[in-house]
Amino acid sequence: MSYRHPVLVDNGGQIPLERIPVLHYDLFADSLLAEYGRGSRVAAYFAVPPGDGADGALEIFAIMARERNGNFAVLRTAIGDRFQSLTPNCLQLHLFEREIAEQFGVVPEGHPWLKPVRFCPAWRPGQAAREREAGLNPPPGAMDYYRVEGDGIHEVAVGPVHAGIIEPGHFRFQCHGEKVLHLEISLGYQHRGLEKMLVGGPHPATARQMETIAGDTTIGHMTAYSLVIEGLVGGEIRPRAQTIRALGLELERLANHVGDIGALSGDIGFLPTASFCGRLRGDYLNMTAALCGSRFGRGLVRPGGTGFDLSPQLVEQLHATLGTIETDTLGACRLFFDTPSVLSRLEGVGRLSRSTAEDLGLVGVAARACGVPRDSRFFFPVGICRKNFDEMITDEKGDVFARARMRHREIEVSIDLVRRLLTSLPKGEAETPLPPLRPNSLCLAMIEGWRGEVVHVAITGINGRFRRYKVVDPSFHNWVGLAVAMRGTQISDFPLCNKSFNLSYCGYDL
């Protein structure tokens, strides 16, 4: 196996494109697999068409996260209409390669299961993914599903329209009695073509688009985008703005973790904690609204700093509110986790092993619940995380109970962090003017959102505008984890298992 040392970049850092060599595909493949074999993992993998109207080959960029080194390896190659799939040797690439095939009409030969990702039209005129007629796209969900044959096997199809007010997604179970042998998940019902809309940006609407990639991760995605912009101009925001951003990010984490524990309580009929957490989630959202006027944090984070500042009176108000909510939050969680009937319903359900989680490339709460030490706040810290985050929480069991307990433990850490941030808010301005973006450059940012890592990568053209903008929401990595976790589980446990992952449909669909 040949090997080429990749170009390295820090979180939030930028590289001129001329410094990233275009490797022959075989050398690119060997170098990527060598990085993977050394413990690196795939953070982003995407194709870039020729820029600025030029004719040329489609390029692939690989961003490999190197936790042991605290940086990222960047590899680049060019491909034709067909290229050799690397998925058989690196399972983490399976969804990325399917996405490239769908977007650009190229074929990863040897891919084990080249099914649709989002049912979207090909980006390039005249090109069609999966050899269908150009310009014609099947409706979402129209594909061949995996089937288990045999006596007593039956199929259960759920969705895409669901009983609750939730986003659409199709789940198809192959069962023997009540036991799930295989679950296949088909999404793409809300595909918005976001990444294609971002080309040529930043546009006046870009910030609003970033805030709605996944509405429950508004601050996470907007912080990642802002770090990319700031990296492309070569600057870092002021300490006060860093602290306010971190405050918003932790409130977003608290609102969602508390809401998830309440939702798990509701799924098993434990109404005391369900009722408490339903109200407490609203309290944390209201704290975010006090920061910026939006319960989801829209308008709070902007490239160069923040769109809002904190007055001494608001800091005092948030301190007082947090003190009241903390008591109720920890009490509701103790009630939940100290009840034997609750634990008996959670333990052993939807279990994933650590090795499976690592092979699939799971991130965030789902990975850490399996014992995988994966947290960008610890390995790739930016802003105040460099000084304020030195403890990573993991569990070992990998079941619904572990995923719930991870949220409980992170709630305690986040409450303490919010208090420290409010106490140590630096003086100074909260916003810094930014110069134009650097042309012909790549910049990437990774932020630990409440669900897991949020990755943004921008490539600029000769005019300093986005030639390509890649977004990887944590749900993109984790949906397949839910499917695997259901194997051997009772089908009646699906709502509980699904809630323990609580993945985003629109974050996947983009």
Image (spheres, rainbow, N blue to C red):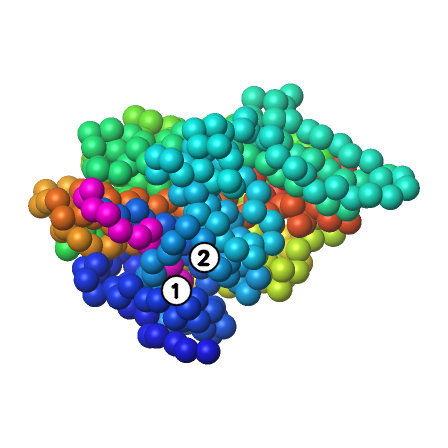
Left or right of residue 176: residue 94: left
Tag 2, which secondary structure? strand
> Mark 1 touching mark 2, by CB under 8 A?
yes
Mark 2: few/some/many CA within 10 Å (<14, 14-19, 20+)? some
Question: Could you tell me how far apart the alpha carbons at marks 1 and 2 are, in whole angstroms?
Answer: 8 Å
359 or 423: nearer the eye?
359
Residue occupying the point 44% across, 47% down: 106
Q: Is residue 386 covered in magenta?
A: no
Mark toward the start of the polypeptide (1 vs 2): 1
285 or 227: nearer the eye?
227
Residue 478: image x %, image y %?
54, 48
Q: Is residue 36 above or below residue 150?
A: below
Residue 83's disc number: 2
Residue 207: image x %, image y %?
26, 34
Write down the region rendered in magenta. 52-66
Residue 261: image x %, image y %?
59, 39
Q: Report which quarter residue 76 is drawn in.
A: bottom left
Q: Report which quarter residue 468 is drawn in.
A: top left
Q: Is residue 302 above or below residue 224?
A: above
Q: Is residue 249 among what the camera can see? A: no
Residue 99: image x %, image y %?
46, 45
Q: Is residue 11 among what the camera can see? A: yes
Residue 25's disc number: 1
